[in-house]
Amino acid sequence: MLQPLLETYGKNIYIDRKSSQSFKWYIIKKEDILNLINYFKKYSFRFAKKNKLYLIPKYYELKDFKAYKTLSGTLLEKSWKNFHNK
């Protein structure tokens, strides 16, 4: 079942050590993650944490600005707190 993802996006598949009958596919590069999110936007799907998935681009944006360590009271700090609450 993971073969189409592997062919499209490459990356890694490994056997889940807890259960020899399952496999996990994973990606770690920012570009690959953002490409996968774009795929999910194009091909609609349903799952409980869908909204959190769509927060990932905002996370990268705030991380690039180092919003997590800005001075208290700045707009960037407020943006980080707002993101963190979501």
Image (spheres, helix red, strand yellow):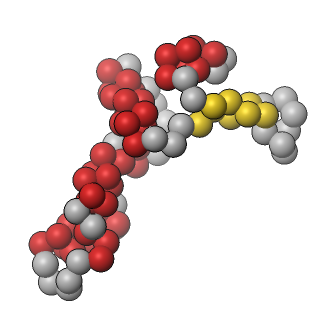
Q: Residue at x 46, y 45 (%)?
A: 49
Q: Looking at the picture, does residue 59 appear above or below residue 49?
A: below
- Residue closest to the far left: 75
Query: In terms of depth relative to the viewer, which is nearer, 46 or 57?
Result: 57
Question: What x and y, as percent, mark residue 82?
Answer: 25, 67
Quarter containing the C terminus: bottom left
Query: In terms of depth relative to the viewer, which is nearer, 17 or 11?
Result: 11
Q: Residue at x 43, y 33 (%)?
A: 32
Query: In terms of depth relative to the viewer, which is nearer, 29 or 84?
Result: 29
- Quadrant of the image occupied by residue 64: bottom left
Quarter containing the N terminus: top right
Q: Looking at the picture, does residue 65 appear above or below residue 75?
A: above
Q: Looking at the picture, does residue 76 appear above or below residue 71?
A: above
Question: What x and y, as percent, mark residue 62?
Answer: 26, 60
Looking at the image, residue 80 sits to the left or right of residue 9; the answer is left
Q: Residue at x 30, y 46 (%)?
A: 57
Q: Looking at the picture, does residue 3 appear above or below residue 19?
A: above
